[in-house]
Image (spheres, rainbow, N blue to C red):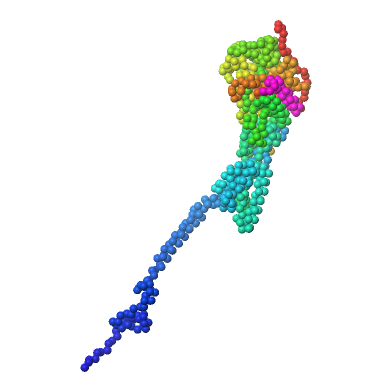
């Protein structure tokens, strides 16, 4: 009989998963294989029998957090650098870009004549400037703003278009000067153009365009411009002011430190090329320059300039000069040059005419120098005006045969006659009496020439002034020791020559010539110039004797200067005709014609000297072409200064003697 098995106990264990295929949730019987999933299910699972598990996101989050932390740290470090470490530097850069600073030009002092009439003054002007940064494409909204602006400004400023474009194409700079010292009319033209372009830019921007404005960066700075109301009058004395506003010649250069004053400065905030009124500004005011009053008389200067210019043109000469001097004060009343120039427009001036030839040219004076030789002879007691001097047609001295300007039979002249007829031979004979030997005579004559100021500057301290040429007596050549007494072999300038005659007219006392009478500072305080130095050259007796002898040159019918005679006045004068050294070739070529003197001879007030270089048409004798100039200028000066006529007749010293007397 079959045995009965005891019932099986169910042992508790882990729950088994439900059958995925049947979905019944019941356990699969033991020993039975798991059913296979359908092919479609396997295909949906990617053909993989196992599922893919995603990685943890925590590492990625940590990396992103680290990167963000580093970025923020960099920002914090930079912020600390800008706001704490380099705060002052960046603030300064910001101020520099925001603020503009420019110089306020000081008003240059006036130069006037002795009556206060302006000879050189200053008027309002504008320096046309620009901010190159405002011409960049970013600021101007135009890719070619510098070129467009240059094309517009070039014809107004008279500048090269390419040069202007180059100045406007430097964006690293915030300041450039396009043109200096332009008239108010020029700036008005530019302002009108700026307004037109600003309106167009505003309209374009309102219509949705970029609003380009190629002239927004053009600015101006107020300054002054030097003008000369009388054109070329006294230009040789005044000089001119260069493009930088500095004296470029003449008194403008010599007195530049006093005339220019002290510039000021102004600093203001700007935006887009326009001042920001609410941002404030700082200003150091300019101090105006000192006004200078000259000794020149404008009317006498005009008369001298006109007379010499007319004769230079008529004689087709290289140039000429006239100097007028007050004999009692040494003040220069006129100093004229021909040809001259207009300092208002140097572009049209001949560069050879710039400067003051009356002080800068040196030349051999000829017979006007004989007055110094006669002064030495009289002062040393070697002869008197009546001393007889027999003058042959030729005189052999050293290695040369000397002659006078004309052939003549033997002349029987007094010392006064030697001067009146301007005899070279007679002068050589007279000065030979200054010493026991020719060497001693040379030394004595040299000492007097030096006392008269030859070989040294006049004392004016004028730019480029020449002291002339006078060798030491021991260095005089064989011919020089005989030519120097009559004015060849030494050189001087026109001012020195005039000073010689001022000395004789002033009783033998030389006064250093002066051009500046006084100055007036910015506060209106007037200061007179220091009194010039005075030097006794010859005695008053010698000077008065010489004055009488010089009258014979003009008054006596045998004199060489009769064309200088002035009705109602006693006139003392001396002619000169010298061989001229060609400055290019260095040899004698042509002549220097001259005339010098003073009036009234009995009470001297005014000395006049004139010279013409290389006259090529008509006469070349000093008495013929310079005598009339002397007369015109002297007459005008006497009337202008209201000098009364002479109250006595000329002395009329004897000119000749009869042999055997």
Residue at (67, 29) in percent of width and height: 339
Q: Is residue 12 magenta?
A: no
Residue at (48, 56) in percent of width and height: 78
Highlighted range, magenta: 615-640
Say which of 180 and 198 sits in front.
198
Q: Is residue 624 visible?
A: yes
Residue at (66, 13) in percent of width and height: 426
Q: Residue furthest bottom?
A: 1
Q: Residue furthest left?
A: 1
Image quadrant in which the N terminus is located: bottom left
Q: Position of residue 488 (x, y in %)?
A: 62, 19
Q: Position of residue 293 (x, y in %)?
A: 68, 33
Say which of 59 and 371 sits in front.
59
Residue 16 lies left or right of residue 305; in this view the side is: left
Q: Is residue 519 visible?
A: no
Say which of 123 and 212 sits in front.
212
Q: Position of residue 328 (x, y in %)?
A: 70, 25
Residue 458 lies left or right of residue 630; in this view the side is: left
Q: Is residue 414 above or below residue 490?
A: above
Q: Quadrant of residue 610?
A: top right
């Amino acid at each position: 009989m079959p045995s009965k098995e005891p019932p099986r106990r169910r042992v508790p264990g882990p729950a088994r998963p439900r059958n995925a295929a049947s979905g019944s949730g019941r356990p699969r019987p033991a020993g039975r294989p798991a059913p296979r999933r359908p092919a479609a299910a396997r295909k949906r699972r990617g053909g993989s029998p196992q599922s893919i598990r995603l990685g943890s996101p925590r590492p990625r989050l940590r990396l992103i957090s680290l990167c963000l932390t580093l970025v923020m740290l960099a920002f914090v470090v930079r912020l600390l650098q800008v706001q704490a470490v380099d705060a002052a530097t960046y603030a300064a850069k910001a101020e520099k870009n925001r603020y503009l600073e420019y110089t306020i030009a000081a008003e240059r002092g006036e130069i006037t004549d002795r009556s206060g009439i302006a000879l050189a003054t200053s008027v309002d002007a504008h320096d046309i400037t620009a901010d190159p940064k405002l011409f960049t494409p970013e600021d101007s909204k135009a890719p070619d703003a510098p070129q467009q602006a240059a094309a517009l400004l070039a014809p107004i400023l008279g500048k090269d278009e390419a040069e202007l474009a180059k100045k406007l194409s430097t964006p690293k700079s915030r300041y450039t000067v396009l043109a200096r010292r332009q008239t108010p009319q020029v700036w008005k033209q530019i302002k009108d153009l700026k307004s037109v372009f600003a309106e167009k830019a505003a309209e374009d921007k309102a219509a949705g365009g970029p609003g380009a404005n190629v002239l927004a960066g053009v600015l101006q700075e107020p300054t002054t411009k030097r003008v000369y109301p009388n054109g070329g009058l006294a230009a040789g004395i005044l000089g001119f002011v260069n493009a930088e506003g500095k004296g470029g010649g003449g008194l403008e250069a010599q007195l530049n430190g006093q005339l220019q004053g002290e510039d000021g400065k102004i600093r203001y905030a700007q935006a887009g090329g326009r001042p920001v009124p609410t941002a404030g500004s700082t200003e150091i005011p300019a101090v105006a320059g000192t006004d200078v009053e000259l000794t020149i008389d404008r009317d006498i200067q005009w008369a001298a300039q006109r007379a010499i210019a007319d004769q230079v043109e008529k004689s087709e000469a290289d140039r000429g000069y006239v100097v007028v001097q007050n004999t009692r004060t040494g003040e220069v009343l006129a100093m004229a040059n021909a040809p001259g120039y207009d300092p208002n427009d140097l572009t049209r001036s001949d560069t050879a005419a710039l400067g003051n030839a009356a002080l800068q040219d040196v030349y051999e004076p000829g017979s006007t120098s004989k007055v110094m030789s006669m002064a030495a002879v009289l002062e040393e007691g070697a002869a008197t005006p009546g001393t007889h001097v027999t003058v042959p047609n030729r005189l052999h001295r050293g290695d040369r045969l000397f002659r006078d300007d004309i052939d003549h039979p033997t002349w029987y002249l007094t010392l006064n006659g030697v001067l009146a007829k301007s005899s070279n031979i007679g002068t050589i004979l007279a000065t030979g009496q200054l010493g026991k030997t020719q060497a001693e005579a040379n030394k004595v004559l040299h000492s007097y020439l030096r006392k008269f100021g030859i070989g040294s500057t006049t004392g004016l301290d004028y730019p480029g002034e020449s002291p002339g040429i006078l060798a030491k007596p021991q260095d005089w050549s064989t011919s020089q020791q005989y030519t120097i007494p009559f004015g060849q072999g030494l050189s001087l300038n026109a001012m020195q020559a005039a000073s010689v005659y001022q000395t004789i007219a002033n009783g033998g006392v030389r006064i250093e010539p002066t051009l500046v009478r006084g100055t007036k500072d910015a506060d209106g305080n007037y200061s007179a110039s220091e009194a010039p130095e005075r030097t006794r050259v010859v005695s008053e007796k010698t000077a008065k004797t010489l004055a009488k002898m010089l009258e014979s040159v003009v008054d006596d019918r045998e004199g060489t200067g009769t064309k200088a005679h002035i009705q109602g006045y006693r006139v003392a004068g001396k002619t000169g005709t010298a061989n001229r050294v060609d400055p290019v070739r260095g040899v004698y070529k042509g002549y220097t014609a001259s005339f010098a003197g003073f009036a009234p001879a009995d009470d001297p007030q005014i000395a006049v000297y004139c010279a013409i270089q290389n006259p090529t048409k008509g006469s070349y004798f000093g008495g013929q072409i310079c005598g009339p100039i002397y007369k015109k200028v002297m007459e005008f000066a006497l009337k202008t200064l209201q000098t009364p006529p002479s109250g006595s007749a000329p002395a009329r010293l004897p000119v000749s003697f009869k042999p055997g007397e």
